[in-house]
């Protein structure tokens, strides 16, 4: 393991600990259960799952560090310079699905990839981001989420937040539905345009910003009353989440194709989901407003300054 990899791994393990502790404290009921695992082809991880809490219906905060002598064909096709290289991939990935339809689902991921070959310079990059998937959205929450994202990016250049916000909007778009999965946030990948130290600092800034972005929203919404009709709508919208993860998500596809641990990879899926044939929200309803107003790749910082 290189010095670079050791530094990233130490940060990611600490980040997993801090996020789990913060979410447990906010839930006030359930605790994370850890499942340490090893990958026969090389590496392993710590899967931590929380379920049936006072706030969280199901959630997971996973750390993984996998390595091997060759990548799956899909990865080599995307990056031909990786052919014949050994690789290491480290990351923390999390998804939180609350009970209350007024509390959004949240997702975050930070990761590092390095591929090495004797006699050649290593190929490395960082990736990650965080995004929010509300069901009954509030402008206050959307603006707050994006303001935290902008502050995390600000030390690295004025163009960073707009670029990675736009990338998030593009990436988390459900093409076959022609709609965004949520109200976005940040997404970046293949980041090596800066030197290693700056790139690593940026990844840490994004990882550290997740709790600051999410917990105030949970605190504002977790005691809000909800109806069974709203719960049904939440389950319909969770179906969109499942569709995106199984059809388009790079992390899910890479994990399954590279022989990753299926239980950990599919931890992101919600426990209760609903599909209905040609279901449509009632015009003028709160449910219709989600897609008509909130899921429109909006400039939430401009909304907050309006």
Image (cartoon, helix red, strand yellow):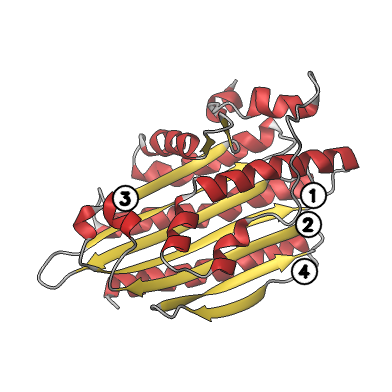
Q: Position of residue 128 (x, y in %)?
A: 44, 52
Q: Residue furthest front?
A: 277
Q: Quadrant of the N terminus?
A: bottom left
Q: Residues within 10 Å of mark 3 (few under 14, many from 20)?
A: some
Q: Residues within 10 Å of mark 4 (few under 14, many from 20)?
A: some
Q: Residues within 10 Å of mark 1 (few under 14, many from 20)?
A: many
Distance from disc 4 to disc 3, alpha carbons, whole Å, reads: 36 Å
Residue tagged 4: 30
In the image: residue 193, left or right of residue 247: left
Q: Kindly state the secondary structure of the residue where label 1 is placed.
A: loop
Q: Earlier in the sequence, mark 4 or mark 3?
A: 4
For the point 79% across and 63% down, the residue is 53
Q: Earlier in the sequence, mark 4 or mark 1?
A: 4
For the point 44% across and 33% down, the residue is 166
Distance from disc 2 to disc 3, alpha carbons, whole Å, reads: 35 Å
Q: Earlier in the sequence, mark 2 or mark 3?
A: 2
Residue tagged 1: 222
Q: Quick check: 35 above or below 133?
A: below
Q: Is residue 149 visible?
A: yes
Do callouts 2 and 3 mark residues in contact (Cβ within 8 Å)? Answer: no
Q: Kindly state the secondary structure of the residue where label 2 is placed.
A: loop
Distance from disc 2 to disc 4, alpha carbons, whole Å, reads: 9 Å
In the image: residue 187, left or right of residue 194: right
**Residue 279 lies in what quarter of the image?**
top right
Q: Position of residue 273 (x, y in %)?
A: 74, 49
Relative depth, front residue between 93 and 41: 41
Residue tagged 3: 191
Q: Earlier in the sequence, mark 1 or mark 3?
A: 3
Residue tagged 2: 55
């Amino acid at each position: 393991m290189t010095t670079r990899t050791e530094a990233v791994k130490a940060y990611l393990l600490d980040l997993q600990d801090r996020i789990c502790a913060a979410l447990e404290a906010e839930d006030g009921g359930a605790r994370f259960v850890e499942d340490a695992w090893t990958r026969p082809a090389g590496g392993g991880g710590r899967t931590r799952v929380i379920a049936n809490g006072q706030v969280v219906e199901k959630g997971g905060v996973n750390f993984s560090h996998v390595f091997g002598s060759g990548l799956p064909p899909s990865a080599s096709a995307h990056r031909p310079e990786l052919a014949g290289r050994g690789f290491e991939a480290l990351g923390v990935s999390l998804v939180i699905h609350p009970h209350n339809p007024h509390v959004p689902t949240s997702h975050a991921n930070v990761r590092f990839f390095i591929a090495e070959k004797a006699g050649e310079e290593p190929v490395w990059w960082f990736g990650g981001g965080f995004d929010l998937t509300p069901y009954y959205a509030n402008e206050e929450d959307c603006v707050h989420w994006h303001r935290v994202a902008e502050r995390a990016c600000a030390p690295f250049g004025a163009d960073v937040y707009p670029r990675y916000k736009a990338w998030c909007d593009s990436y988390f778009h459900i093409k076959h539905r022609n709609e965004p999965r949520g109200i976005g946030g940040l997404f970046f990948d293949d980041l090596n345009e800066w030197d290693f130290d700056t790139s690593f600092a940026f990844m840490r800034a994004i990882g550290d910003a997740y709790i600051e972005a999410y917990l105030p929203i949970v605190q504002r919404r977790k005691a809000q009353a909800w109806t069974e009709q709203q719960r049904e709508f939440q389950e319909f919208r969770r179906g969109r989440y499942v569709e995106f993860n199984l059809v388009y998500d790079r992390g899910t596809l890479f994990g399954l194709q590279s022989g990753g641990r299926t239980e950990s990879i599919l931890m992101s899926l919600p426990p209760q989901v609903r599909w209905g044939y040609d279901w449509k929200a009632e015009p003028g309803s709160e449910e219709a407003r989600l897609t008509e107003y909130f899921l429109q790749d909006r400039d939430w910082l401009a909304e907050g300054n309006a």
